[in-house]
Image: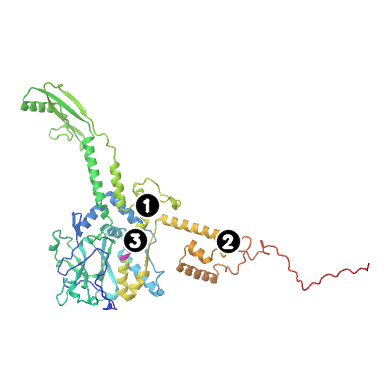
């Protein structure tokens, strides 16, 4: 296991040696680093029951087979991935990527090729469900070692129970291992943290030791290089125990409680449903042994010996079988009330399932699924967004977070493909990856309704504020405060408007005549300016002379 299997992609520009910190890199995947002589497996102790990661994943898979859990998981998967006959469940978005059209075209082609390798249009539901249930996902990126520039040839799924991610300290030549202070010479600038080696260990036998972790040696399995495996986690980490969890983890207790309540309810109903009789047999002054023998004789004489065979439909006398719910036969001494037969009533509250409903709701809350979806009491409402339940909004945000986390799988595969084909360098990818988005096919109408209503309300506010623009409000204030446009959106919209005016798609507002009475643009084809105020003709005072006074005779 000294040699790694697979391939590694090295950075072309090594990190500066002057950048030194005693704090190891923060990896929010639940995998801590181990000493070079330690074990490589994750050791977890969750409530003293699940001691290893192997047992934990096994527990998650058993939970997914429970009807209530399966219904919730299917609802989440169907919400996250929408399968359409024409469109792919996911598309890459390069609108914010500052690159040439040629690079964008290559990135789109490689992403499409990765989806074809995964057969994502057909297996998307299965892939996403495995990732959600296990809380982690492994894919082996198979390449041609002799022709690495041809990129990924195959993507093979690896069972999460057979693979482990390991961080291990590298041994120093001076044999100073596992001693962080040995690198500290007194000068804080000379402080150096042990260098970590990262790799994957594959064990095809699908077995994991459950003994003491000290016995878990690091000499079993096949070591894979970090770059040859795609590793995607749920993002949910137990920070106290340092282990990667599934979103099903917090539902473990709720599911166990529901199972126990349901089982106890079945047992109670089977035992308390029928009415049973109590026979008080008068034994007089008989001794104890004789009294017991007399009681057995009476019981065998009057007990119902007929049994019903459900397989054949026959009713026969079979003494080999005794009824599960027997009547009570009790002796009574002389001086009592003699032989008596009374009836013991059955259970009275057999229809009460309030406790079942409580634990069912508790389970649904633990699984982050709205209760209204599971119960199915109300129909699907496509009305105003104000009628949408708050649980649906929370559920939509939860699914959005899951999509973001799941997209890390595509980013890792796309990175490997672009680097192997020399489309970009590792440094270029670090810049590009921040601007690459993945758009999932959306089927949640609640978000669309909310956005449409918000836009309608904003446009109504703009129309109301129109007479006051230039008097009390500036145009920039209206765009930023009412329409909520950002700086990027303002620049983008202005540029698009100029382009459409230049192309003739929309008329130039500067050349349009505005009706002062209505504020609406006038049709230039109409003769005259309808609605314009009637103006008196101007009189030039310089051109006219004062009228002469009429000349009359003197008085």
Q: Does the magenta stretch include residue 118?
A: no
Q: How crowded is mark 1: few (under 14 residues within 10 Å), some or many (20 or more)?
A: some
In the image, is 329 to the left or to the right of 364? left
Residue 391 circle label: 1
Residue 467 circle label: 2
Magenta region, mostly helix, strand or loop?
A: helix
Q: Residue drawn at (55%, 67%), measured in percent from left and top?
A: 506
Q: Residues within 10 Å of mark 3 (few under 14, many from 20)?
A: some
In the rendered view of the protein, which quadrant contains the C terminus? bottom right
Residue 367 circle label: none
150 or 208, which lies in front? 208
Q: Residue drawn at (29%, 52%), measured in percent from left and top?
A: 366
Label 3 and label 1: CA atoms lie apart by 18 Å
Check if mark 3's residue and mark 1's residue have beta carbons within 8 Å: no
188 or 449, which lies in front? 188
Of the residues under marks 2 and 3, which one precedes in the sequence?
3
Label 2 and label 3: CA atoms lie apart by 44 Å
Label 2 and label 1: CA atoms lie apart by 40 Å
């Amino acid at each position: 296991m000294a040699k790694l299997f697979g391939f590694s992609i090295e950075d072309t520009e090594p990190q500066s040696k002057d950048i030194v910190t005693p704090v190891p890199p923060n990896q929010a995947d639940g995998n801590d680093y181990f000493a070079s002589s330690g074990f490589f497996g994750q050791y977890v102790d969750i409530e003293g029951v699940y001691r290893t990661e192997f047992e934990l994943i096994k527990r998650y898979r058993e939970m997914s087979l429970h009807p209530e859990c399966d219904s919730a998981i299917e609802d989440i998967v169907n919400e996250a991935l929408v399968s359409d006959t024409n469109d792919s469940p996911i598309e890459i978005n390069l609108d914010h990527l500052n690159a040439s059209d040629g690079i964008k075209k290559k990135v789109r082609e490689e992403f499409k090729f990765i989806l074809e390798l995964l057969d994502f249009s057909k297996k998307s539901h299965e892939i996403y469900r495995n990732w959600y249930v296990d809380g982690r996902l492994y894919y082996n990126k198979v390449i041609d070692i002799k022709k690495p520039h041809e990129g990924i040839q195959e993507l093979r799924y690896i069972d999460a129970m057979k693979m482990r991610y390991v961080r291990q300290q590298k041994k120093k030549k001076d044999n100073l291992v596992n001693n962080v202070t040995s690198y500290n010479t007194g000068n804080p600038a000379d402080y150096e943290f042990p260098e970590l080696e990262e790799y994957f260990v594959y064990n095809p036998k699908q077995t994991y030791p459950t003994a003491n972790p000290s016995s878990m040696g690091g000499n079993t399995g096949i070591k894979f290089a970090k770059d040859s495996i795609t590793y995607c986690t749920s993002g949910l980490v137990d920070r106290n125990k340092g282990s990667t969890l599934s979103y099903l983890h917090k539902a473990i207790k709720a599911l166990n409680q529901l199972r126990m309540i349901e089982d106890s309810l079945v047992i109670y109903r089977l035992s308390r449903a029928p009415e049973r009789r109590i026979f008080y047999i008068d034994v007089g002054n008989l001794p104890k042994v004789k009294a017991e023998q007399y009681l057995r004789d009476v019981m065998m004489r009057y007990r119902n010996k007929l049994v019903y065979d459900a397989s054949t439909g026959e009713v026969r006398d079979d003494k080999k079988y005794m009824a599960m719910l027997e009547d009570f036969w009790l002796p009574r001494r002389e001086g009592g009330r003699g032989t008596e037969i009374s009836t013991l009533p059955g259970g009275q509250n057999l229809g009460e399932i309030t406790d079942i409903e409580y634990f069912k709701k508790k389970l649904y809350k633990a699984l982050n699924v709205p209760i209204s979806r599971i119960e199915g009491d109300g129909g699907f409402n496509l009305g105003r967004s104000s009628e949408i339940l708050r649980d649906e909004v929370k559920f939509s945000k939860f699914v959005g977070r899951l999509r973001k986390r799941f997209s890390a799988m595509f980013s890792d595969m796309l990175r490997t493909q672009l680097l192997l084909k020399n489309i970009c360098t590792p440094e270029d990818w670090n810049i590009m990856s921040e601007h690459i988005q993945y758009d999932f096919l959306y089927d949640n109408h609640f978000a669309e309704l909310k956005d449409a209503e918000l836009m309608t309300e904003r446009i109504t506010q703009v129309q109301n504020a129109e007479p006051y623009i230039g008097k009390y409000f500036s145009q920039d204030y209206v765009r930023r405060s009412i329409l909520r446009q950002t700086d990027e959106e303002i620049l983008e919209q202005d540029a698009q408007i100029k382009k459409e005016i230049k192309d003739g798609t929309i008329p130039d507002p500067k050349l349009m005549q505005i009706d002062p009475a209505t504020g609406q643009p006038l049709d230039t084809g109409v003769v005259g300016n309808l609605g314009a105020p009637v103006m008196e003709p101007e009189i030039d005072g310089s051109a006219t002379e004062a009228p002469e006074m009429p000349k009359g005779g003197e008085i």
